């Protein structure tokens, strides 16, 4: 019998309370504890995959049932400690003002600052050490998008919020602008009450989605989602979606911006999530001129790095095709009309053609 099995139930209650207090001290806005029964979420995942809604995200099919069965991913796991950390860098109204701006780029608010994986992982490791100092050695693993985990169903079970119709987690007091992280543990901690849904009859997220990716309440076809198209998709963006993407060059926040529950969201006080290099309101043409060296320097430590320079240019080319026709925009596109990169050139040529169509219509009128 190890030391953990000797912890008495009252002591486990105290430990759970301390864990939540330590989490807040480390900068998390909330922590909750759940068991590892995800059979309902497992069924929903299987149905989602069967409909091919994951597109090219083949990793969603990998690892067998480890994603929905925590004890198969980390043997001995009995509980999951879920945490959330707010990241909204500015008042939400400022983000809304940028949507479909005629010359500015829109980057999903979560990617404006330091890569959240690094921030949350460091804080979760610190939380794990605090638990060790209190209990002695125990089994655990820190997870922040680093392994197959159904983080939203786990967070819902832990009482951090409910999964909304847009499939993001919503907290009734804080909206949905937050990151999630997990600590898998073999500690038999008391679990929290799962959150209840408060979406009601609202369908704001379904109605505002630019590409109709939310095909029904709680059903997201990732193949239509702008976040998928600008981040996950490695090849050409389907022509049918290019005009709908507008000025969104990395991710999309529309379903969050227009969610009524985000009236309760507050800007984060976390300095790591503050926008870097003016990315919260940059001109598309300025970003399109960045050399690869400049891009590498200005995305260091950022989640944006994951798409690579080629897809960065691809995405901006599409946004420039949707931008206001000005000499500056046309010159920027022409300057990259023959890069030798097939993917980039295709999207630049498409963008140039959009402005030629605008010019043609103007002449005919």
Image (spheres, helix red, strand yellow):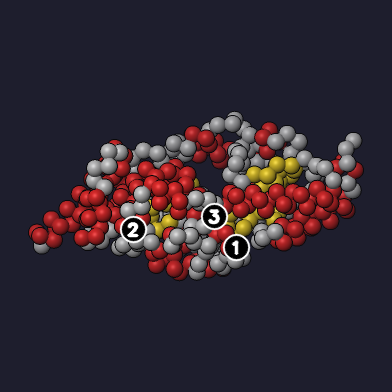
Q: Residue at x 62, y 58 (%)?
A: 85
Q: Residue at x 68, y 44 (%)?
A: 142
* Quarter-of-image position of residue 98: bottom left
Q: Residue at x 70, y 54 (%)?
A: 32
Instruction: Specify whether residue 206 is in view.
Output: no
Query: Quarter of the image containing the N terminus?
Result: top right
Q: Say if 261 sits above or below 124 in the image.
A: below
Q: In this image, 67 relative to 220: left or right?
A: right
Q: Look at the image and tell me in which quarter the C terminus lies.
A: bottom left
Marks 2 and 1 in Cβ contact (< 8 Å): no
- Residues 360 and 270: in front is 270
Give me the residue at 66% from left, 47% from top. 182
Distance between mark 2 and mark 3 Cα atoms: 21 Å
Q: Secondary structure at mark 1?
A: loop
Q: Quadrant of residue 223?
A: top left
Q: Tell me if mark 3 has few (under 14), some (14-19) or many (20+) residues whose alpha carbon lies within 10 angstroms of its own.
A: many
**Res 184 seen here:** yes
The residue that label 3 is drawn on is 114
Q: Say the numbered circle drawn on residue 270.
A: 1
Compare marks 2 and 3 and give the one earlier in the sequence.
3
Q: Which residue is the extreme one toward the left? A: 364
**N-terminal label among 3 and 1:** 3
Q: Mark 2 vs mark 1: give the one in front.
A: 2
Provide the residue designation for mark 2.
286
């Amino acid at each position: 019998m190890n030391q953990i099995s000797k912890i008495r139930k009252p002591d486990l209650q105290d430990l759970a309370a301390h864990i939540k207090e330590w989490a807040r001290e480390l900068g998390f806005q909330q922590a909750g504890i759940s068991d590892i029964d995800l059979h309902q979420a497992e069924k929903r995942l299987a149905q989602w995959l069967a409909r091919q809604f994951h597109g090219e995200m083949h990793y969603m099919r990998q690892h067998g049932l480890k994603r929905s069965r925590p004890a198969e991913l980390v043997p001995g796991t009995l509980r999951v400690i879920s945490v959330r950390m707010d990241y909204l860098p500015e008042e939400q109204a400022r983000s809304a003002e940028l949507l479909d701006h005629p010359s500015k780029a829109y980057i999903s608010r979560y990617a404006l600052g330091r890569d959240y994986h690094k921030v949350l992982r460091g804080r979760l490791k610190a939380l794990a050490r605090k638990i060790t100092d209190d209990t002695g050695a125990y089994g655990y693993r820190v997870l922040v998008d680093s392994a197959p985990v159904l983080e939203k169903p786990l967070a819902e079970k832990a009482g951090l919020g409910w999964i909304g119709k847009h499939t993001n987690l919503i907290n009734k007091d804080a909206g949905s602008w937050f990151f999630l992280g997990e600590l898998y543990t073999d500690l038999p901690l008391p679990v929290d009450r799962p959150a209840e849904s408060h979406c009601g009859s609202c369908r704001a997220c379904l109605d505002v989605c630019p590409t109709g990716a939310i095909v029904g309440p709680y059903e997201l076809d990732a193949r239509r989602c702008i976040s998928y198209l600008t981040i996950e998709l490695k090849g050409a963006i389907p022509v049918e979606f290019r005009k709908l993407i507008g000025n969104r060059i990395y991710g999309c926040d529309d379903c969050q911006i227009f969610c009524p529950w985000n009236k309760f969201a507050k800007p984060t006080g976390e300095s790591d999530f503050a926008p870097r290099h003016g990315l919260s309101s940059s001109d598309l043409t300025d970003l399109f001129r960045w050399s690869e060296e400049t891009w590498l320097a200005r995305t260091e430590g950022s989640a944006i790095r994951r798409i690579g320079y080629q897809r960065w240019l691809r995405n901006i080319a599409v946004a420039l095709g949707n931008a206001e026709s000005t000499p500056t925009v046309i010159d920027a596109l022409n300057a990259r009309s023959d890069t030798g990169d097939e993917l980039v050139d295709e999207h630049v040529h498409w963008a140039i053609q959009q402005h030629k169509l605008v010019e043609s219509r103007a002449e005919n009128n």
